[in-house]
Image (cartoon, rainbow, N blue to C red):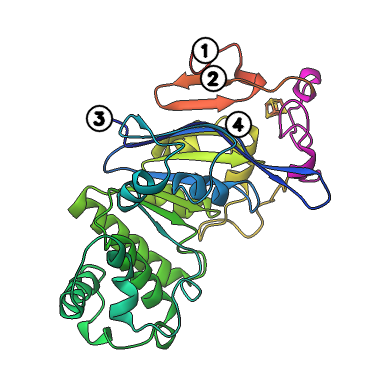
Amino acid sequence: MSECILEGRGLTRRYRRPDGRTLTACHRVGLQLFPGETLGVVGESGCGKSTLVRMLAQLERPDEGELLFRGEEITGLKGEALRRYRPHVQMVFQDPAGAFFPRMRVWDAVTEPLRNFQPLSRAQRREQAARLLERVELPADFLDRYPHSMSGGQRQRLGIARALALEPEVLLCDEATSALDVSTQAQLVELLVSLQKKQNLSILFVCHDLALVQSLSHRMIVMYLGTVVESLPSAHLAADALHPYTRALLEAVFSLHTPPDKAVAPLSGEVPSPIHRPRGCPFHTRCPHCMEHCAQEEPPTISVAPGHTVACHLYSGTSRSEGE
Ligand code: SF4
């Protein structure tokens, strides 16, 4: 496989709460993103997906772990070095309505990132804005509109256009389609796939919709309570997923072909609080296969097949730990 473009190793992020307690949003998260691929990140609300994205975008610093871009460590970048990193990795935010300053017209909003990196005249920025709108299939006569006069799908296209303004190699999409209706979601996904093919973009696509992530991504990681519990090629998800949490997510997916009388087996047990992370396996309070030592020992991440890892004691004897 080609050189990894963005890599996280053991990324951990904790927040100190006003009451003195500590919330662990991400716990030793590792991932690799390769050129031209889409890596899906899936998990329930509150599982640490957005915190992970913010660390990758260098909007937050990890408390532990390392970030690498094209093999070079970038974890502690500051000042000018951090500014030079920013154009390479750009974000598309979840809320297209809140992502733009309401008094900026479209041409100004979409080229706002250029102000920090290229001294362009107003006319040059308008030209650049028109090119960006064309890339996301928005008409040029939107240039003088305000974002609030556009539909949710159009605003999200605008968000993608703004993220593309600096010609990034990596797009971090944090629940970028979650606020949209299903048909608009599908159009946005088509646009992302087409942009990826044209520009060899690497995309990290974060979403709680397992079916959507699976359809869009080449590989995916599954997070639970701030931890990556499984990673595997998306095409193998339904047949090969092993972790009891991934299997439970798959069981809960509805489709047009789901028989109306199909029994849905929701996970029982409480979702633990990230303020009180359980010892051992983070999933042991809800796992139907929980064994005695699951509550004591954190399962190592095991490689079970090429490109497929799982963190579960059920498979601890099947192969080697990652990093061995
Ligand atoms: Fe379930 Fe134990 Fe595996 Fe955790 S380690 S998922 S509790 S079997």
Task: Name the amino acid type tagged 4.
Answer: His
- Determine crowd level at label 3: few under 14, some 14-19, many 20+ residues with C-alpha closer than 10 A: few
Mark 3 or 1 closer to N-term?
A: 3
Q: Residue drawn 31% across and 62% down?
A: 116
Of tags 4 and 3, which is closer to the observer?
A: 3
Observer-nearest residue: 178 or 227? 227
Q: Say which quarter of the image contains residue 113.
A: bottom left
- Determine crowd level at label 2: few under 14, some 14-19, many 20+ residues with C-alpha closer than 10 A: many
Q: Residue drawn 32% across and 67% down?
A: 162
The residue that mark 2 highlights is 302
Q: Residue drawn 76% across and 50% down?
A: 17
Cα distance in 3D space between marks 1 and 2: 6 Å
Element type where label 3 sits in the image: loop
Task: Name the amino acid type tagged 1.
Answer: Ser
Cα distance in 3D space between marks 4 and 1: 15 Å
Q: Residue drawn 79% across and 25% down?
A: 295
Task: Name the amino acid type tagged 2.
Answer: Ile
